[in-house]
Amino acid sequence: MSLGAYGTLCTEVYDLTKPVGQSIGGDLEYYKERLRSCRGRILEAMCGSGRLLIPLAEAGLAVDGIDESPQMLASCQGRCEERGLTPRLFQGKLQELSLSCLYEAIIVPAGSFLLIEDREESVDVLRRFHDHLMPGGRLILDLEMPDLQSLKTGSTGMSTFPHPDGTVITMESRTVEADLYRQVVVTHLRYEKWRQGSLVASELQRLALRWFGIEEFRMLLENTGFSKVTVSADYEYGRAPSHHRQIFTYEANRN
């Protein structure tokens, strides 16, 4: 069992629910359009098992990926090999990001930036992103606000994920902390894998999500050295956010 990481069972659920090329709310189409003009390299931070990285690479973009989870990267690598793709994949924490090249764009889709629980570490990662961009390079990332239900400590949920091999993975979730002052929600997840009525594997995960106010994050980007910051709602570039249930996509340039 693992705690605080995207382990084997979590990766299996991710692969079942987020197959390669699946667009969530229009994010794949949005990122393809915003990156269409890129001629240099692109880095997808927290690339997971390649849901977006692979179709972006198939569209002819030079995409690298980095993720902390070796299980996620192994899945991404396998999916790339099946398609004859050879992107550069790196395993490591964004808090320690130190790669050898500068990028024309760095992207963090699907709200994954929220997984950085500590605020100061979030700021440090933004600085590292800034330093890994070439002059004029762009950072594009998604943020979202927590669902109001998730702010109720003790809230629970149960999901079931059948696997093509006949096994079933169940996932039980429980909100254990909702700290409005720190802007963090912590959920405990328990994964169990069953085969013909017998438990064959289990895994625990501590999932912490930090959220930011819309203008708060704009100021963080500007204080980190980014300019030309725009915020778009629900994958419609230039559409101003109007309520907390929307996805907010930030785009900012390194000078």
Image: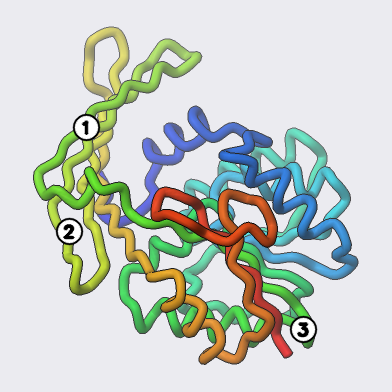
Inspect the image, locate mark 1, and give the three-letter code of the amino acid beneath it: Gly
- For mark 3, does the 10 Å Cα neighbourhood hold few (<14), some (14 to 19), or many (20 or more) residues? some
Q: Residue at x 38, y 16 (%)?
A: 167
**Between 70 and 160, the one nearer to me in the picture:** 160
Figure check: 167 above or below 88: above
Mark 2, residue position:
178
Mark 3, residue position:
134
Q: Are marks 3 and 1 in contact (CB under 8 Å)?
A: no
Inspect the image, locate mark 2, and give the three-letter code of the amino acid beneath it: Ala
Q: Is residue 66 visible?
A: no
Quadrant of the frame with the N terminus:
top left
Q: Would you say 4 lies left or right of 79 here? A: left
Figure check: 218 above or below 7: below
**Between 136 and 228, the one nearer to me in the picture:** 228
- How far is disc 3 from disc 1 in space, using C-alphas? 44 Å
Q: Which mark is residue 157?
A: 1
Name the N-terminal-most of marks 3 and 1: 3
